[in-house]
């Protein structure tokens, strides 16, 4: 293909390329801005959550902060409940010591009764020895023996009841401590797992929001690259006008430069010099266009490479962030499960606390039975008192019993001691019942408050978990469709990158024409050297009006000036006066 035709092809192709840029790049930029705006709205939506409690929309970070504050406050309240529980248990423990002390009275009554039984047996033996004079005393001591046996039997019953109460109290403390340990473990697990789960969710949501905002800021580099490529549109006029001027010069050349110089006349030399200058000028202008096209190619290559790297980096980081968020929040289901477990465990705790209340009330009932048994001692005490009085009367009536005075004194003394132990024991048991009843009431009130608080706290916490779950689902749904760059933008971007290959083809065409013209110029230069061989000059200067005519048709001032330098003509002033230039 002739150089002129190649150059016309270059002009046509460059116009097509830059026209495509002028048409497509504003759309590309618009799609880019639309995608970024959409991404920004999606990022903004990360920070808003719908409160399932009916509180409307709320900022996620504020809501999570509120969740942590509520939980911390609740944990602090639970600590206070533990302190109150400890106070109640200490009072109950002190009451138990009093109860254990009351059990000593029963042991003392039994011991005294056993001693009284021995004394009565000795007295009975002495009465039998006394014969008819001791018959009345024998009956009395027989009754005493019977009453003491009842007393000993009654103490056994009381000891068994006391043992049952002791076992029940021990069971209460064991179960209470176990329940308390379960509560501590439950709250510790809550603090460690659930609170850390909430904190982890907040950290992940804040991290992905921050990262996406940073990536959104990174997109500015792509915008900058697109705008920089669009700036190269101004090169089209320069390319077209420059190549028009080269075509104008080529039109002045003969079809073949090989026949130039057959005649050695000076006019022929003038013609050859004219053609050489035209070729030199065309080569220089093409070289200038080549350089500018090369710059444009570099601008395209550098900015497309920068934009492509940015685009791929942003997309890769986005995918990494999404995968990280989803993977790290797989434990979110565990958070919900922990919340449900917490509710279940507080239910168990409630049941165990209620059973402890039932246990205390059962203890109170059993102690009441002991008091009732103690009350039966009053009748025994009366019998013992009667026996003691009758013994002294019988002793005073029968001289044969005069040796029994010491035994009768011992019986009277033991009877008095039994009566004292019965009275003191009954008093302490009644006091214990009063104390433990009061403590039981306080414990019931404490347990009810604690369980009401736990139920309210658990319900609120699970509502918060539900809200967080909705936020998690919302973020996950947004992330599943989240894009910085739409498919339309990616398509336009990929298509626009093809412009770079077409510009490289133009550069190759220009190079081919330039090399062709350089070969022709080299051939004419050889002919000129041959014609000048033997002449006294090595350079040939002509006053060429044709060159002035051609140069004056140039529209680019820099090319006029270059033409003047090549031809040795002073065209700058004249060109400026005639106004036949276009400045770029």
Image: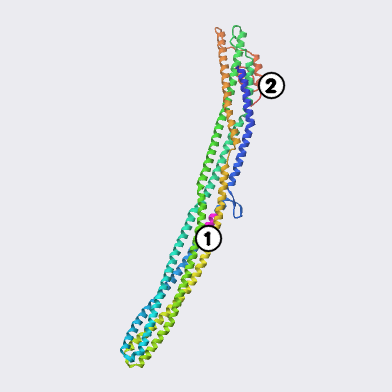
Residue marked by disc 1: 454
x, y percent for residue 335? 51, 52
Q: For the residue labelled by badge 1, is the local secondary structure a helix, a strand or a loop?
A: helix
Of labels 2 and 1, earlier in sequence is: 1
- Horizontally, is 204 left or right of 555 in the view? left
Residue at horizontal 56 percent and vertical 46 percent from the top = 475
x, y percent for residue 368? 47, 74
Mark 2–mark 1 distance (CA, rounded to whole Å): 97 Å
Q: Is residue 560 visible?
A: no
Proximity of marks 2 and 1: CB atoms separated by less than 8 Å: no
Q: How is the image coloured?
A: rainbow
Residue projecting furthest to the left: 129
Q: Where is 406 relative to 559, above or below?
A: below
x, y percent for residue 15? 63, 25
Q: Where is 131 relative to 286, above or below?
A: below
Q: Quadrant of the N terminus?
A: top right
504 and 536: which is toward the camera: 504
x, y percent for residue 25? 62, 32
279 and 464: which is toward the camera: 464
Q: Which mark is residue 298?
A: none
> Mark 2: few, some, or many residues within 10 Å (few <14, many ≥20)?
few
Q: Quadrant of the C terminus?
A: top right
Q: Where is 212 relative to 432, above or below?
A: above
Tell whether position 69 is magenta. yes
Q: Is residue 374 visible?
A: yes
Tell whether position 192 is magenta. no
Residue marked by disc 2: 578
Magenta-colored span:
67-78
Magenta portion: prevailing SS class? helix
**Which of the 4 image quarters holds residue 287?**
top right
Residue at horizontal 35 percent and vertical 82 percent from the top = 117
557 and 169: which is toward the camera: 169
């Amino acid at each position: 293909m002739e150089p002129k035709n190649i150059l016309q092809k270059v002009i046509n192709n460059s116009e097509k390329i830059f026209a495509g840029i002028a048409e497509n790049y504003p759309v590309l930029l618009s799609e880019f801005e639309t995608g970024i705006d959409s991404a920004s709205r999606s990022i903004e939506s990360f920070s808003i959550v719908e409160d399932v409690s009916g509180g409307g929309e709320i900022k996620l970070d504020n809501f999570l902060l509120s969740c942590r504050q509520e939980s911390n406050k609740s944990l602090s309240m639970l600590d206070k409940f533990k302190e109150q529980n400890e106070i109640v248990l200490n009072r109950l423990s002190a009451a138990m010591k009093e109860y254990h002390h009351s059990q000593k009275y029963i042991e003392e009554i039994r011991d005294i009764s056993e001693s009284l039984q021995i004394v009565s047996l000795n007295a009975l033996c002495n009465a039998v020895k006394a014969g008819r004079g001791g018959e009345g005393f024998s009956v009395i001591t027989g009754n005493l023996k019977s009453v003491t046996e009842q007393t000993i039997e009654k103490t056994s019953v009381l000891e068994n009841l006391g043992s049952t109460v002791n076992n029940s109290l021990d069971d209460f403390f064991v179960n209470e401590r176990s329940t308390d340990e379960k509560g501590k473990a439950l709250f510790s697990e809550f603090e460690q797992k659930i609170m850390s789960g909430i904190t982890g969710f907040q950290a992940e949501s804040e991290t992905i929001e921050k990262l996406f905002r940073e990536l959104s800021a990174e997109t500015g580099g792509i915008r900058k690259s697109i705008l920089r490529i669009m700036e190269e549109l101004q090169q089209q006029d320069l390319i077209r006008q420059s190549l028009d001027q080269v075509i104008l010069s080529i039109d002045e050349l003969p079809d073949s430069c090989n026949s130039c110089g057959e005649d050695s006349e000076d006019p022929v030399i003038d013609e050859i010099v004219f053609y050489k200058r035209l070729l030199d000028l065309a080569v220089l202008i093409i070289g200038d266009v080549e350089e500018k096209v090369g710059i444009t190619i570099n601008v395209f290559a550098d900015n497309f490479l920068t934009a492509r790297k940015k685009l791929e980096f942003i997309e890769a980081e986005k995918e990494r962030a999404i995968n990280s968020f989803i993977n790290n929040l797989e434990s979110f289901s565990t958070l919900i499960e922990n919340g449900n477990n917490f509710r279940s465990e507080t239910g168990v705790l409630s049941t165990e606390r209620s059973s402890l209340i039932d246990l205390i009330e059962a203890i109170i009932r059993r102690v009441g039975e002991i008091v009732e048994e103690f009350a039966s001692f009053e009748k025994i005490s009366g019998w013992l008192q009667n026996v003691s009085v009758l013994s002294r009367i019988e002793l005073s009536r029968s001289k044969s019993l005069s040796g029994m005075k010491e035994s009768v004194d011992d019986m009277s003394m033991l009877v008095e001691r039994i009566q004292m132990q019965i009275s003191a024991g009954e008093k302490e048991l009644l006091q214990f019942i009063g104390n433990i009843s009061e403590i039981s009431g306080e414990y019931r009130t404490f347990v009810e408050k604690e369980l009401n608080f736990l139920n309210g706290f658990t319900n609120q916490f699970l509502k918060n978990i539900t809200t967080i779950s909705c936020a998690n689902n919302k973020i996950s749904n947004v992330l599943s469709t989240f894009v910085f760059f739409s498919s339309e933008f990616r398509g336009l971007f990929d298509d626009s990158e093809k412009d770079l290959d077409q510009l490289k083809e133009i550069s190759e065409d220009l190079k081919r024409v330039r090399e062709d013209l350089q070969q022709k110029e080299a051939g004419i230069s050889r002919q000129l050297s041959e014609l000048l061989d033997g002449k006294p000059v090595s350079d040939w200067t002509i006053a060429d009006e044709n060159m002035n005519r051609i140069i004056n048709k140039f529209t680019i001032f820099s090319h006029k000036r270059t033409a003047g330098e090549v031809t040795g003509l002073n065209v700058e002033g004249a060109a400026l006066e005639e106004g036949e230039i276009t400045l770029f």
